[in-house]
Amino acid sequence: MAKNSTITIRQVGSPIRRPESQRKVLAGLGLGKMHKTVELQDTPEVRGAIAKIPHLVEVVAD
């Protein structure tokens, strides 16, 4: 993991009928609507959040 590296993620799953905790993880990542893409710092915290909801997001670029 390089210094100041970013990761781009896209929401591919709907938060409808998902537990509240998964919705909060999506909101924490800056997502909430289908096919929205965000670019975040590549940190262990962001990687952990992605690992909690792999069925709702995909990594577009590292």
Image (cartoon, grey):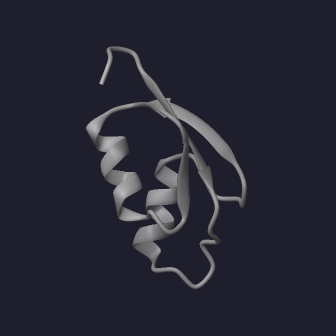
Q: Where is residue 26 in the image (x, y as percent from the top left)?
A: 51, 58
In the rendered image, the residue lying farthest to the bottom is 17
Relative side of 54 to 52, left or right: right
**Vertically, is 55 above or below 30?**
below
Q: Position of residue 16 (x, y in %)?
A: 63, 79
* Residue at 66% in and 43% down: 37
Snapshot quadrant of residue 11: bottom right
* Residue at 58% in and 85% down: 17
**Vertically, is 8 above or below 4?**
below
Exactly how many numbered labels are in the figure?
A: 0
* Residue at 32% in and 14% down: 3
In the rendered image, the residue lying farthest to the front is 61
Relative side of 38 to 19, left or right: right
Q: Where is residue 32 in the image (x, y as percent from the top left)?
A: 64, 58
Snapshot quadrant of residue 56: bottom right
Looking at the rendered image, the quarter that the N terminus falls into is top left
Relative side of 34 to 7, left or right: right
Decide which of 4, 27 is in the foreground and name it.
4
* Residue at 37% in and 43% down: 46
**Vertically, is 43 above or below 52?**
above
In the rendered image, the residue lying farthest to the top is 3
